Amino acid sequence: MLTIRTAIAQGSELLERDSIPEPRLTAELLLAHAIHCERTYFYAHPERELREVEWIHYGRYLDERLKGKPTQYITKHQEFYGREFKVSRAVLIPRPETELLVETILKLNRERGVVIDVGTGSGAIAVTLALELNRCVIATDLSWEACEVARSNAFCLGAKVKILEADLLKPFADSTADVIVSNPPYVPLNDRAALQREVRDFEPSLALFAGADGLAVYRNLIPEAGRVLKPGGVLAIELGFGQSEAVSAMASDWRNLRLIPDLAGIPRVLVCERQ
């Protein structure tokens, strides 16, 4: 029979041969998912033999990963801001760089008011803000399937989040929100062929692409936010690479506009206030 040590070694070799990033970590994550345990279990029990059903599941997970399916869609989990979120192919996999968007909102020190997360996907932003701020957050998404994933995450993590299936901010009346936050689709359709297969072939197009230049959602979201925000309300949105100048121009009539760079020095978040 196959032991944990051997299974990890063989899985790592297969993944490395196919140029899968972080082959050993990936092998460990897939094996942990197959035998329903934490990775730390492996270090204490390297000679534990796998049951037949476990190595069958492990082999299937390795095959899916070798075909390009992201590890997060296989394990159905992704960590964000120190918490485990459920993910499915209905939602974008939360990225570490989006944590900067959360941190930007937390630094506003606004203890009260209405917070809306537009295009919530897995609910990572809305749930995190609700828990960190200890308040209710409203979230919208155009996808019914994404709303269901977000509801599940809010329930499992004990967050007060009201989730609406909606197109951007259409359900909201004028001047009702204090803070609007969004990580919208911003990948140009023209860049589709150049994307990694894990992104291009598996993540939802609705959450990725925004017209030929990647700016289509910004063009609608920024005016809508101007309508829904109260005077002095804050808009914080994530930016794609090379989009800061174009998006800043769309918000040229807002005040206190600033760009916040990520760890690589790339402008990642745009923050501004309604006049």
Image (tube, helix red, strand yellow):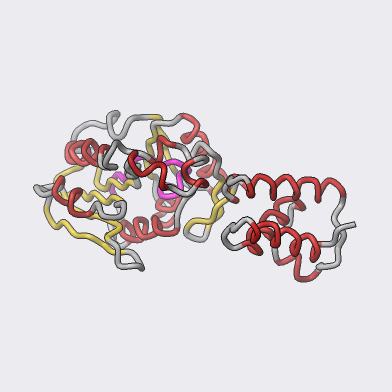
Residue in view at x 46 percent, y 51 percent:
94
Residue 9 in percent (x, y) is at: 75, 64
| Location of residue 42 in the rendering, given as x and y in whole percent from the top left corner | 76, 66
Q: Quadrant of the N terminus?
A: bottom right
* Res 49 → quadrant: bottom right
Going by the image, does 100 lie left or right of 144? Answer: left
Can residue 52 be seen from the camera position used here? Answer: yes
Q: Is residue 262 above or below residue 118?
A: below
Asked if 2 appears above or below 208 in the picture, the reply is below
The stretch of residues the image draws in magenta is 113-126
Viewer-nearest residue: 193 or 267 = 193
Q: Is residue 184 visible?
A: no
**Residue 159: image location, x then y, percent:** 48, 47
Q: Position of residue 175 (x, y in %)?
A: 19, 38
Residue 265 falls in which quadrant of the image? bottom left
Q: Is residue 269 above or below residue 69?
A: below
Left or right of residue 260: residue 92: right
Left or right, 20 with respect to 109, comes to right
Q: Residue at x 57, y 60 (%)?
A: 21
